[in-house]
Image (cartoon, rainbow, N blue to C red):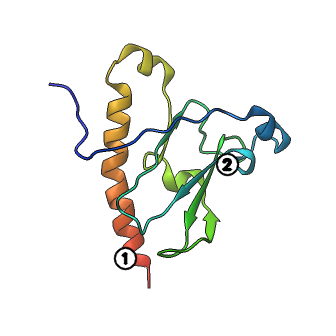
Amino acid sequence: GGWRLLQPCSLQLSRSLCSRCARNQFSSLGGKPLWIDPHDWSVQHICIDDNIRLDDSDTIVHPQVFSGQGSSCARTVPTAELYDVCLVQTDLLEAIADPSYFCRCVKRCEENYERYLATCAESSP
């Protein structure tokens, strides 16, 4: 059997902005913004890209987490905090060889996201 989504979802694709990354020395601060709201359990953002790195000075995503429920203030977080939760570095050879590669990445992120949200809920006042 194939993998299937348990919940309805939407998919959004974004184009890399290499010039913006270059102006910021290819650090996360010049990368694609990724906003995570750990207080909204109905939405999970996942970015899968071969240029995601654990080294924040050499990655293409600028991960930010909202500080509270309904808050518009977000703090920049290290890529490591969201790695395999919302951020996945593509293994190019495996992605080519395995037709279910991306589905497995999404499933792993969904499982890890549940744990991440539980941890955030425990640490919230």
| Mark 1 vs 2, N-terminal side | 2
In the depicted structure, whether residue 17 falls above or below residue 80: above
In the depicted structure, whether residue 108 falls above or below residue 94: below
Say which quadrant the C terminus sits in: bottom left
Structural distance between the alpha carbons of marks 1 and 2: 26 Å
Q: Quadrant of residue 72?
A: bottom right
Q: Amino acid at mark 2?
A: Asp
Residue 53 locus on image (x, y percent): 61, 40
Q: Quadrant of residue 103?
A: top left
Which residue is denoted by mark 2 in the rendering?
56
Task: Please give the name of the residue rendered at 33% of the width and 48% of the height, measured from the top-left corner.
Answer: 110
The answer to whether 102 appears left or right of 54 in the picture is: left
The answer to whether 12 appears left or right of 8 in the picture is: right
Q: Single out the residue that lies furthest toward the top.
A: 97
Q: Amino acid at mark 1?
A: Glu
The answer to whether 98 appears left or right of 56 in the picture is: left
Task: Please give the name of the residue rendered at 33% of the width and 42% of the height, measured from the top-left corner.
Answer: 108
Q: Secondary structure under badge 2?
A: loop
Which residue is denoted by mark 1 in the rendering?
122
Residue 60 locus on image (x, y percent): 66, 40
Residue 21 locus on image (x, y percent): 76, 39
Q: Secondary structure under badge 1?
A: helix
